[in-house]
Structures are given as structure tokens and as C-alpha cells.
Image (tube, grey):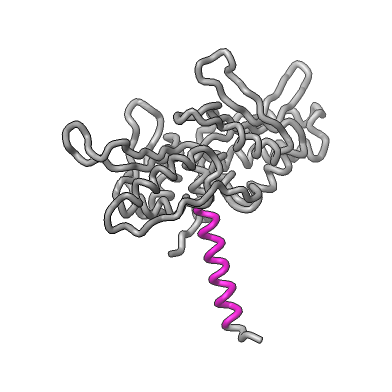
């Protein structure tokens, strides 16, 4: 039987390993939701300058504290405001940092962006004096197994509460939208379908008359909302959506108690709704103190 010191050491190693999985899967979801993997088709440009790949992660303007925290955790990349857009961009360009990012993403990707990752791995493997990297397949594990969905929601999720004064009707829903077809002509249906199934919902195509169609998953029942609430309590959000989720969860409480249809609670729900999403003026970032620590 092992000593107590050995047991503590083994537990510490396992805990460290799990923390790394949570950060890597969260980062992967973040990049698959609102990031870009750019791999040059040609080694040299028309000006005879060598082309290099890049991994970029986009953050809304109000999520600057999260962007700074992610950059600090990665310990690489440059953070810049995107001109003419309410957004910041972490751009990772050096060969060493690119290889590091690939090691984080490889094995955790679930969307068609995996083909961009594989193209990037091919580029790395073509370089001289580089240890070859094996291309992992898509992560087929349960969405409950890691923080991937949390990162994906961070990028493209929306917590919605609607209140109708005419009949005191309240809606408490979550939705997630992605382009139907990505830049490589690959469909995002499969990854959205898995999320829809997880949330006891389904995938709907929107903007059908527009050139750029979208797929949307929206919770439609209490069961799906409770599943999402439980998941995000286990794998939290760290951007401005953290507060929107907390407010949404407070509204969900009335639904779980089955009192959301009572007029006496209408004003309380409307008050919560009035400070959510684009109406939010004040932001608190204490939750970033609990952000993932990447152990190497």
C-alpha cells in the first residue's frame, strides 16, 4: 500500500493534468467559435518574403480583461485593437508559439476547423529540424467531459430573456449561432447537432433567403436550460457573458419554481432583464481570479 505522501503526489499530478485539459478544451472551443487558423498556400510571397501561419482569437471590446487573461496564460501572442471593429485580436505568429498552440488544440477540436489545424500541422511537419506532430481526429467525447462548450459559448452564445407586458409572458432561452458553411465550404451542421442534442433541442437553419445562411441551436424547454445551467456551473464562462449567464440563471430560478407566470414576479424578472447583454453598463471581473492555471 502506498504512503500518504505518494497518494498526495499522485492526486496532485492528476489534478494538474485535469486543469490542463480544462484550459486546452476551453481554448479550443474559443478558437473554434471565434478564432482563425491561417496557413499560407505558398512559402514565399510575391515580394519574395517568406509567409508564416497565424492563429488568431477574437474578443469583443468589452471582453478586454478576458483577452488579457488568455494572453497571459498562453504567455505568447500580441494583443491589438482591430481597426473599425469593436474587437480585440490575439495574434500568434512565431514558430515556437504556433507549435505550442497546436499542442493545446490537437485532440480537442470538434468542428470543421480541424481541417485548418491539420493543414497547419502539415506546414509544421514540412519544416526542417521539426519534430513531427501526429494529427488527432475530432474529439468525439461527451460535451460533459471538458470545457470545450464553455469556450464555444464564450465566443458565440447568447442568453436571452424576453418579457411581454400584454400577457405577462416570460421567455428564458439560450441560443448559439454559427455560419451554415465555413470558409472551406464545410458544413457546421454536425457540431451544432451535437450541441442541440445535448441541450434537448435541435438545429434550425436561419437567414435562408440570405447569401450567408446560419445554423441556430436554441433551448426550447426547461430540461435543456437546466442541463446548460448545470454544465456552466461546472465549466464556467469567464468573459462578460459570465454575468449574463448569472442573470439568466436567476430568471431560470422562477421557471424551476414554476412561478414565472405569476404577475407578482414579472417586475423582478424585467428588472433583471434590463441589465443584461447590450444593456449592461457595469462589469465585474472577480471571476477571472478563478481562471485556468496552465501547468507545464
Q: Nearer the viewer, residue 188 or 130?
A: 130
Q: What number of labels is visible?
A: 0
**Numbered range of the magenta stretch:** 6-24
Q: Does the stretch in magenta take in 13?
A: yes
Q: Nearer the viewer, residue 24 or 153?
A: 24
The C terminus - image quarter: bottom left
Residue 268 visible at all: no
Q: Does the stretch in magenta take in 59?
A: no
- Residue found at x 32% / y 36%: 41
Q: Is residue 153 left or right of residue 227?
A: left
- Residue found at x 46% / y 63%: 295
- Residue found at x 45% / y 35%: 60
The N terminus - image quarter: bottom right
Q: Is residue 27 above or below residue 111?
A: below
Image quadrant assignment for residue 100:
bottom left
Query: Where's residue 183, x and y in %?
Result: 45, 29
Q: Residue furthest left?
A: 47
Amino acid at each position: 500500500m502506498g504512503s500518504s505522501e505518494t497518494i498526495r503526489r499522485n492526486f496532485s499530478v492528476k489534478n494538474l493534468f485535469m486543469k490542463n485539459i480544462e484550459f486546452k478544451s476551453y481554448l479550443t472551443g474559443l478558437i473554434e467559435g471565434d478564432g482563425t487558423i491561417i496557413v499560407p498556400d505558398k512559402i514565399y510571397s510575391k515580394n519574395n518574403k517568406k509567409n508564416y501561419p497565424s492563429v488568431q482569437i477574437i474578443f469583443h471590446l468589452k471582453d478586454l480583461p478576458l483577452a488579457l487573461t488568455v494572453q497571459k496564460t498562453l504567455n505568447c501572442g500580441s494583443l491589438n485593437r482591430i481597426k473599425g471593429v469593436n474587437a480585440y485580436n490575439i495574434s500568434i505568429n512565431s514558430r515556437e508559439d504556433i507549435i505550442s498552440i497546436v499542442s493545446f488544440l490537437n485532440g480537442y477540436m470538434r468542428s470543421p476547423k480541424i481541417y485548418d489545424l491539420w493543414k497547419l500541422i502539415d506546414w509544421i511537419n514540412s519544416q526542417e529540424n521539426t519534430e513531427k506532430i501526429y494529427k488527432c481526429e475530432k474529439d468525439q467525447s461527451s460535451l460533459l467531459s471538458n470545457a470545450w462548450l464553455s469556450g464555444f459559448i464564450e465566443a458565440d452564445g447568447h442568453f436571452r430573456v424576453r418579457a411581454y407586458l400584454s400577457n405577462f409572458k416570460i421567455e428564458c432561452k439560450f441560443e448559439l449561432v454559427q455560419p451554415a458553411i465555413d470558409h472551406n465550404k464545410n458544413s457546421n451542421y454536425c457540431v451544432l447537432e451535437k450541441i442541440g442534442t445535448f441541450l434537448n433541442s435541435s438545429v434550425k437553419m436561419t437567414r435562408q433567403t440570405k447569401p450567408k445562411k446560419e445554423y441556430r441551436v436554441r433551448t426550447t424547454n426547461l430540461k435543456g436550460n437546466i442541463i446548460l445551467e448545470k454544465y456552466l456551473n461546472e465549466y464556467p464562462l469567464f468573459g462578460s457573458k459570465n454575468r449574463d449567464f448569472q442573470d439568466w440563471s436567476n430568471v431560470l430560478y422562477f421557471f424551476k419554481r414554476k412561478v414565472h407566470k405569476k404577475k407578482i414576479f414579472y417586475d423582478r424578472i424585467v428588472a433583471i432583464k434590463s441589465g443584461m447583454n447590450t444593456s449592461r453598463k457595469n462589469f465585474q471581473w472577480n471571476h477571472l481570479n478563478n481562471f485556468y492555471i496552465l501547468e507545464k
